[in-house]
Amino acid sequence: MREHPEGGLELLDPLLERRVHVLDIGELDATWLEGPVAEALRERLWSARTRPEPRGLEAVEVQAAWEHVAGLPPEIAPAWRQVEAWRRLAEDRAAGRRRLLLRGFVEPGFSWAIPAPSRLETELVQAWRERVEAPLFAHPAVRALCGAVLGIELGLEVVANRWRLDPGDHMGPHPDGLRYAGTWSLGLARDWRAVDGGAIAFGVPTSQGFEVHERYLPHHGDLLLFRPGAETWHCVEMPHRSRDTLTGWWLR
């Protein structure tokens, strides 16, 4: 720490290799000061230097179902009528990726009306919902290929909801139950931006609130897949304009 030529103080943090100019010590955030945040950060950095190797991941062999690409229904976009797109995604999952994003999964003109929604007002959910049939996700080729990339056999039974969240709506943190073999969410929001909010946010509940680790925006045509379980905590953050999705599950 030393005095800065323009006033205030200049500090060097050798742990994070950063330099900062402040006018007063009170401007520093909690990572510079003594306390739980600084101690936790030091512990993580020490561990990163002394034990950098990844833990416990053993890649698995992918069971291919690529012949089903030829039988995909017409709603599926050309980019996903190529075996290589599915193969790469399956290998990503086999290498440890838990959430799989299929960008532009359906044709740009794909739409799904919500003619008779019901309003949900619960502690967990504030949104418009309509229970719908989803034959696209019951299609044999779609089930086979999604099952291949998720590494699980998907059954015939599918349940689905068409959702609309208006500004101020949200879905609170929850894990999808073990009744479900696979979860999918198809974005139907056109021209969506980060400032519009409404992301599917994955993380963990903490005493200070839901700690977000990863976010997915509901871009039109993008399909998000994951295998649900007790640790698949996620929520839908509050949107700033109407947010549309089609979401469902393959049942066990």
Image (cartoon, rainbow, N blue to C red):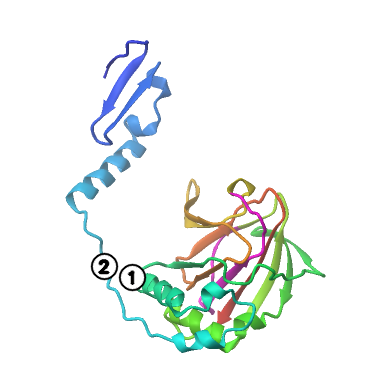
* Number of numbered labels in the structure image: 2
Labels 2, 1: front one: 1
Residue 250: image location, x then y, percent: 56, 81
* Residue at x-position 82% and y-position 70%: 115
80 vs 97, nearest the viewer: 80
Residue 177 seen from this side: no
* Residue at x-position 68% and y-position 72%: 161
**Picture quadrant of residue 97:** bottom left
Q: Which amino acid does label 1 sit on?
A: Ala
Instruction: Say left or right for 244 vs 203.
Output: right
- What residue does disc 2 label? 56
Q: What stretch is highlighted in magenta?
A: 172-193
Query: Considering only order in the chain, which callout, 1 or 2, is on the residue closer to the N terminus?
Result: 2
Instruction: Say left or right for 40 vs 196.
Output: left
The reply to whether callout 2 and callout 1 are in contact (CB within 8 Å) is no
Q: How far apart are marks 2 and 1 (CA)?
A: 12 Å
